[in-house]
C-alpha cells in the first residue's frame, strides 16, 4: 500500500493552507505489494480480533498508547477497554504484527461453511461484438488466446457474442455449440427469456485447463454478422435512418443477471463455488440497437448548429442507462473491462461508467494494425489482483476528507467508504483534505496528524501458496479464497512556517490531485473551465510563494515593474510545477475540441490518468527525454522537450518515454556506423524492456531515423518551444511565453 501526500508536513491551520496555495491530500495504491519506500506489510492472522475504537472505529495500531486493560486511539484520543483475549495477546507484543508495524496485512475468517468458502474458481467472460469486421475479430481472437495463456488452472471461462442477438457458447462437449437469443430492437423491450433458460450457467462456464483447445476452436469459428442479417433484424428507424445491429446494452444487462445470484460476492454453481466475475467487453463501434443504444449524431457538425459548446456537449453522458447498469454490475459482483477498437465516435462518455465504477479498465485502440490489445490482455491477467474490496480512509479529528477520486463505487450508506470490485497493484485513488474546524493542529500538543487506511479484500490463492497449511486437506489441489485486512497508519508532522511546508511538497502527488480536480471541472463545466482552473491555480501558487518568501520587488513603487520569481527558484520542490502545468495544458486531456481532439480519446485519457500512480502520471503528462552517445552508453539522463535541447546536446540517439509510447529517435547527423535499430543486447534495449515490464499497459515502441522517416510523432512531443499563435491564452503557447504570461497574471493578481 503506497501512500504519497502532497505535503510531507501538513499545514498548521486553514490560514496556512490558504496562504500556501498548495493542494492538501494524498494518493494511495492499496494493493501495491510494498509501500512508497519499498517496505512490505507485516503478515498475520486473526484480523477480526483487532481492537477498534468505540468512537471513530479506527483500528488499534502501533501509535496507540496501551495500558494493561485499555488503549488510547491515536486518531481521536478516546480511551477504549481491551477485551480479555486482546489482553492475553498483547502480553506478548512481539508476536502481534499490529504491535510491531504500522503496515499490516491480516487474515480474516471467511463467511459461511469453511470448506465451501475455501474452494473458489476465478471466472472470466468474454463478450465479443460480431457487428464488426474480420480484422477486428482476428485481433480479438489473438487477445483472447493470449488471455487463455495467462489464466491459471482453476479458472472458468465463458464466451458470449452480441449483435442483433446474444450468442452463448458451450465448449465442454466434443464440438462447440452456440445458442442464440434475439434482442428486441425497441429500447424499452427486454429479452424474451433469461440467459439461464437459454443455457445453464454450468454449461456456459468451462474449466480452462480442460477446455482450452475447444475454447480456441470456438474463437476461430467467430464470424462477423453480415449486413443482410443486421438490416433484416434492425429494420428502419423512426426517422428513416437505418439502425445498426450492435445490441451491447441489453447484452451486458443480461450477462450481469446471468452471472449474479443470491449468494452475493461468491456465487454457487452446482458443486462449484466461484468468486467475483470479470467481463471483457470488446466493442467495434457504438451501441446502436435495442436498450442502451446511443445517438452518435451529436458528434460532428450537428451540435454546431445548435450553438452548443463542443467541449461541454460531448463530455457528459447522454443517457443514464450505463451508469445505472454499472450499479447492477457492482451489486452482482461483476467487474467490466471495456476494450473499444474503433476510430468512429462511440460515446465513451456514456459507456465509461461500466468500467470505472466496477473497478475495471477502459482501453481505446484507434485501429487493428498496431494495436497492443493482446499484450495488454496478457499483462492485465498475469498480475495479481484483489476483488470485492472495501476501502476506508480515516483521519484524526482535526481534519477530514473532502473529495475522493478514483475508479470505485461509493457506499450508499457510509461516508468515505468505497467499494472496488477488482483492484490490481497499479490501481490508485486520491483524497483531498480540509480542516474540521478553525483551530487546526495545536502548536502545543504532542498529538500530530494521523491517517489510517483500511483495505479489506479477497484474493484467490493458488494451491502452491497454501503449502504451509495442513497438507492433508482434501482441498489442497484447489484454488482457495482468502479474505484479508490491510491497514496502514501514518503519522505526519506539521509545518512551523510556509518554507517548511514548501520544502515538503511532493510535486508528483500535487500533479495527481490537480489532474483529478481539472477532470472534475471539465466534466461539470467544460474543458475551458478546467483549463482556467489550472491556469489560475498556478498564478495563485506563484503569487503566494513570492509573497511568503518576500521576493516581490517594485521599481519606484510601480507594481507594473515588479520582478516576479516565476521559476520558484528558492524552493526545489516547487520548481517542477510550472513545467508540469504547462505540459498538462498542452495535453489532449485539456486541449480544445477545435484543435482536433477526439472526444472519445479525451474520455480515454480521463479514465487512464485518473487511475495512474503519481510517477506514471508524471511520465504521461511530461515525457522523459534522454540521450545516448551509442546504444550502449547514455549521454544525458534528462533533457527539456525542445529542439534546442536536441541540437545543443550533440547526441546522436534520443529516447523518449511518454508512458503509452516509447520512441527511439536517431538524429539526422548520427554516425551511419551506429547500428539501427538498436541491437537487442544493448543498454538502450535493456532500458526499454525494463520499462515495458514495469508498465501497467503495453507502450507502443517506435523507431525513427531523422532525415529518412516521418518524425512528426516524435516532434509533437517537443512542446516547449512552440510560440504563441496570436490567439492569446491557448494551448499552443511555448514554455517561455507561458511563463511570461503567468508572470503578468501574477502581477495583476497581487495588485
Image (spheres, rainbow, N blue to C red):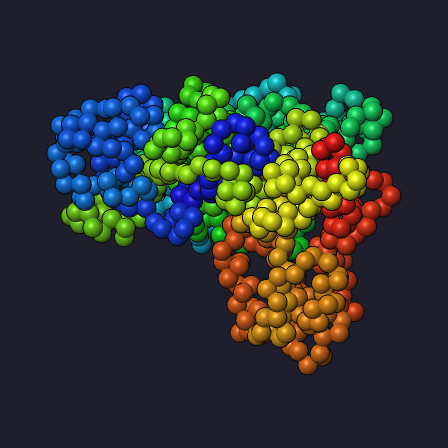
- Name the spot of residue 602 as percent of width and height, x first: 67, 39
| Number of numbered discs | 0
- Name the spot of residue 412 as percent of width and height, x first: 46, 20
Looking at the image, residue 665 lies above or below residue 624: below
Which residue is nearer to you in this view: 162 or 232?
A: 162
Looking at the image, residue 524 lies above or below residue 736: above
Question: Viewed as shown, does residue 340 lie left or right of 99?
Answer: right
Looking at the image, residue 730 lies above or below residue 464: above
Residue at the limit of the structure toward the right, as seen here? 726
Which residue is nearer to you in this view: 696 or 265?
A: 696
Does residue 573 show up?
yes
Quadrant location of the N terminus? top left
- Name the spot of residue 622 as percent of width and height, x first: 64, 51
Looking at the image, residue 209 lies above or below residue 674: above
Q: Which residue is found at the position 74% from the left and 24% from the top?
A: 237
Q: Quadrant of residue 591?
A: top right
Does residue 621 show up?
no
Question: Viewed as shown, does residue 65 lie left or right of 603?
Answer: left
Q: Which residue is found at the position 20% from the left and 41% from the top?
A: 96
Quadrant location of the C terminus? top right
Q: Which residue is found at the position 20% from the left and 24% from the top?
A: 81
Which residue is nearer to you in this view: 554 or 489?
A: 554
Q: Quadrant of residue 599?
A: top right
- Name the spot of residue 47 as percent of width and height, x first: 25, 35
Residue at the limit of the structure toward the front, as seen here? 556
Q: Which residue is found at the position 39% from the left and 25% from the top?
A: 397
Amino acid at each position: 500500500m503506497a501512500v504519497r501526500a502532497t505535503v510531507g508536513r501538513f499545514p498548521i491551520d486553514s490560514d496556512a493552507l490558504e496562504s500556501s496555495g498548495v493542494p492538501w491530500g494524498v494518493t494511495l495504491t492499496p494493493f501495491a505489494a510494498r509501500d512508497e519506500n519499498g517496505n512490505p506489510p507485516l503478515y498475520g492472522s486473526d484480523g477480526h480480533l483487532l481492537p477498534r475504537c468505540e468512537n471513530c472505529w479506527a483500528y488499534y495500531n502501533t501509535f496507540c498508547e496501551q495500558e494493561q486493560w485499555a488503549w488510547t486511539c491515536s486518531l481521536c484520543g478516546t480511551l477504549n477497554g481491551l477485551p480479555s483475549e486482546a489482553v492475553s495477546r498483547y502480553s506478548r507484543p512481539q508476536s502481534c504484527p499490529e504491535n510491531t508495524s504500522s503496515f499490516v496485512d491480516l487474515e480474516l475468517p471467511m463467511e459461511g461453511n469453511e470448506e465451501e468458502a475455501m474452494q473458489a474458481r476465478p471466472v472470466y467472460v468474454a463478450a465479443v461484438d460480431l457487428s464488426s469486421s474480420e480484422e477486428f475479430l482476428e485481433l480479438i481472437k489473438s487477445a483472447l488466446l493470449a488471455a487463455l495463456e495467462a489464466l491459471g488452472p482453476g479458472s472458468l471461462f465463458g464466451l458470449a457474442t452480441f449483435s442483433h442477438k446474444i450468442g452463448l457458447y458451450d465448449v465442454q462437449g466434443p464440438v462447440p455449440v452456440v445458442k442464440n437469443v434475439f434482442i428486441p430492437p425497441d429500447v424499452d423491450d427486454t429479452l424474451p427469456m433469461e440467459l439461464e433458460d437459454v443455457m445453464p450457467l454450468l454449461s456456459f462456464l468451462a474449466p480452462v485447463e480442460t477446455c482450452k483447445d475447444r475454447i480456441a476452436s470456438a474463437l476461430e469459428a467467430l464470424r462477423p454478422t453480415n449486413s443482410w442479417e443486421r438490416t433484416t433484424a434492425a429494420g428502419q428507424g423512426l426517422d428513416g435512418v437505418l439502425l445498426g445491429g450492435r445490441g451491447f446494452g441489453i447484452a451486458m444487462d443480461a450477462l450481469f443477471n446471468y452471472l449474479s445470484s443470491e449468494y452475493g460476492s461468491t456465487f454457487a454453481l452446482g458443486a462449484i463455488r466461484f468468486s467475483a466475475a470479470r467481463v471483457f467487453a470488446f466493442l467495434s463501434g457504438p451501441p446502436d440497437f435495442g436498450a442502451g443504444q446511443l445517438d452518435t449524431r451529436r458528434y460532428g457538425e450537428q451540435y454546431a448548429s445548435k450553438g452548443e459548446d463542443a467541449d461541454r456537449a460531448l463530455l457528459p453522458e447522454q443517457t443514464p442507462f450505463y451508469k445505472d447498469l454499472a450499479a447492477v454490475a457492482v451489486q452482482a459482483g461483476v467487474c467490466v473491462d471495456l476494450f473499444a477498437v474503433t476510430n468512429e465516435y462511440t460515446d465513451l462518455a456514456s459507456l465509461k461508467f461500466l468500467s470505472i465504477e466496477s473497478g475495471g479498465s477502459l482501453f481505446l485502440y484507434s485501429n487493428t494494425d498496431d494495436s497492443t490489445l493482446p499484450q495488454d490482455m496478457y499483462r492485465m491477467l498475469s498480475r495479481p489482483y484483489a476483488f470485492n474490496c472495501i476501502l476506508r480512509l480515516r483521519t484524526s479529528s482535526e481534519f477530514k476528507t473532502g473529495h475522493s477520486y478514483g475508479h470505485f463505487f461509493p457506499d450508499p450508506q457510509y461516508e468515505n467508504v468505497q467499494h472496488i470490485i477488482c483492484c490490481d497493484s497499479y490501481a490508485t485513488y486520491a483524497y483531498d483534505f480540509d480542516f474540521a474546524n478553525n483551530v487546526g493542529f495545536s502548536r502545543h500538543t504532542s498529538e500530530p496528524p494521523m491517517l489510517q487506511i483500511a483495505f479489506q479484500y479477497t484474493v484467490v490463492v493458488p494451491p502452491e501458496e497454501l503449502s504451509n497449511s495442513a497438507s492433508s486437506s482434501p482441498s489442497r489441489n484447489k484454488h482457495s479464497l482468502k479474505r484479508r485486512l490491510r491497514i496502514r497508519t501514518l503519522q505526519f508532522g506539521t509545518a512551523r512556517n510556509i518554507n517548511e511546508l514548501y520544502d515538503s511538497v511532493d510535486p508528483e502527488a500535487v500533479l495527481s490531485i490537480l489532474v483529478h480536480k481539472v477532470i472534475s471541472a471539465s466534466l461539470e463545466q467544460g474543458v475551458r473551465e478546467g483549463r482556467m482552473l489550472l491556469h489560475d491555480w498556478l498564478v495563485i501558487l506563484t503569487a503566494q510563494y513570492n509573497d511568503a518568501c518576500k521576493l516581490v520587488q517594485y521599481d519606484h513603487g510601480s507594481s507594473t515593474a515588479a520582478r516576479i520569481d516565476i521559476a520558484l527558484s528558492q524552493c526545489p520542490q516547487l520548481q517542477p510545477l510550472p513545467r508540469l502545468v504547462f505540459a498538462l495544458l498542452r495535453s489532449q486531456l485539456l486541449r480544445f475540441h477545435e484543435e482536433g481532439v477526439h472526444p472519445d480519446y479525451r474520455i480515454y485519457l480521463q479514465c487512464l490518468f485518473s487511475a495512474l500512480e503519481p510517477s506514471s502520471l508524471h511520465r504521461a503528462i511530461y515525457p522523459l527525454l534522454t540521450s545516448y552517445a551509442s546504444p550502449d552508453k547514455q549521454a544525458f539522463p534528462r533533457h527539456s522537450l525542445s529542439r534546442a535541447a536536441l541540437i545543443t546536446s550533440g547526441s546522436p540517439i534520443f529516447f523518449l518515454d511518454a508512458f503509452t509510447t516509447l520512441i527511439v529517435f536517431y538524429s539526422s547527423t548520427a554516425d551511419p556506423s551506429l547500428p539501427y535499430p538498436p541491437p537487442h543486447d544493448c543498454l538502450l534495449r535493456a532500458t526499454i524492456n525494463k520499462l515495458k515490464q514495469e508498465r501497467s499497459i503495453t507502450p507502443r515502441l517506435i523507431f525513427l531515423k531523422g532525415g529518412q522517416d516521418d518524425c512528426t510523432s516524435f516532434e509533437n512531443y517537443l512542446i516547449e518551444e512552440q510560440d504563441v499563435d496570436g490567439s492569446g491564452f491557448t494551448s499552443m503557447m511555448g514554455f517561455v511565453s507561458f511563463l511570461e504570461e503567468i508572470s503578468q497574471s501574477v502581477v495583476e493578481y497581487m495588485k
